[in-house]
Image: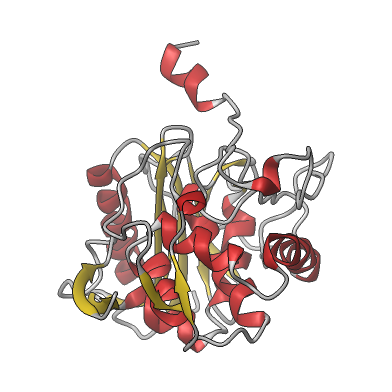
Amino acid sequence: MSSSSLARRRLFTLWGFSALAAPGLFLTPAAAKPARPAAAADSAPAFQLPVNARHALVLENGSGKVLMAKDADTQVPIASLTKLMTAMVVLDTKADLKARIRIQREDVDTLKYSPSRVPVGAQMTRGAALHLALMSSDNRAAAALARTLPGGLPAFEQAVRAKIRALGLTRTEIAEPTGLSARNRSTASEMAKITAAAARYPQISKLSSDLKEKVLINGRPVEFRNTNRLVGRKGWDIRLSKTGYTEEAGRCLALRMKDKAGRDVTLVLLDADGSAERLADAAKIRKSLERSPKNG
């Protein structure tokens, strides 16, 4: 086994979050057997493609027909796709999105040392932090969202456990709100379920699919852009988007889109080798959708 493969399988502890201080906090045990794909269909997939991503699932929304699947039930790290779950939990609590929150030292990534344009001490509305977490995948914003919920991190942990149960997820584990930890794991099938659930929140659909936005930080407008380079590109009608990357997870993508035939589709890619490969996979899938008959 190569050193890079071994690196993908290491588990890390994120000491910057008190939620990880005690083993097993807001984790759900993985099932002994892989679950069937979300909304599994009895018929064979409409097409198969040699995509770079090691795990993939394409679903026709509404009918639940599996249009394409590749090792979709293996549990792997999901990186910042985690933020879809974080956003749902925040919105479920009905926390005031206009309330101002402050980025604190404990929100800084001490595991991957990922960059952020949001400085410690910065103040913004909770809604602005939600926007940054979804559109620009800012880790400090996501950490602050969990920390500042009514009841703090314990309430966030409890809400995550409840959400995992409510969605019927048996192969999903969430250890912290950003996706930096390799302990945040799921499958392509269950990520499709999470994406479908997130799409029922109009705020998540809108904020995650914005191309760019100026966010007030300490009263000063700062422009941020979407981490998904397909958003806003000609020929792409993206209704929800989330990217992710860590060394362990590879390049990940979850999105909902409409194809040229008007078909609503969910696409999940996990563990692609690079950004270019992830984009190429998505483009290849879109072209195959255009060639496959609607509801066929």
State the image coordinates of residue 161 (x, y, percent, origin top left): 77, 61
Q: Quadrant of residue 235?
A: bottom left
Q: Quadrant of residue 231?
A: bottom left
Query: Can residue 40 be seen in this snapshot?
Result: no
Whether residue 52 sits left or right of residue 35 in the image: it is: left
Q: Between residue 29 and residue 38, name the one nearer to us.
A: 29
Q: Residue at x 61, y 51 (%)?
A: 176
The residue at the far left in this view is 234
Query: Can residue 187 be seen in this snapshot?
Result: yes
State the image coordinates of residue 203 (x, y, percent, origin top left): 47, 85
Q: Residue at x 67, y 57 (%)?
A: 37
Q: Residue at x 34, y 69 (%)?
A: 135
State the image coordinates of residue 53 (x, y, percent, origin top left): 41, 42
Q: Between residue 13 and residue 235, name the one nearer to us.
A: 13
- The colour scheme of the drawn protein is secondary structure
**In the rendered image of this protein, does residue 23 appear above or below residue 227?**
above
State the image coordinates of residue 76 (x, y, percent, origin top left): 58, 40
Q: Quadrant of residue 258?
A: bottom left
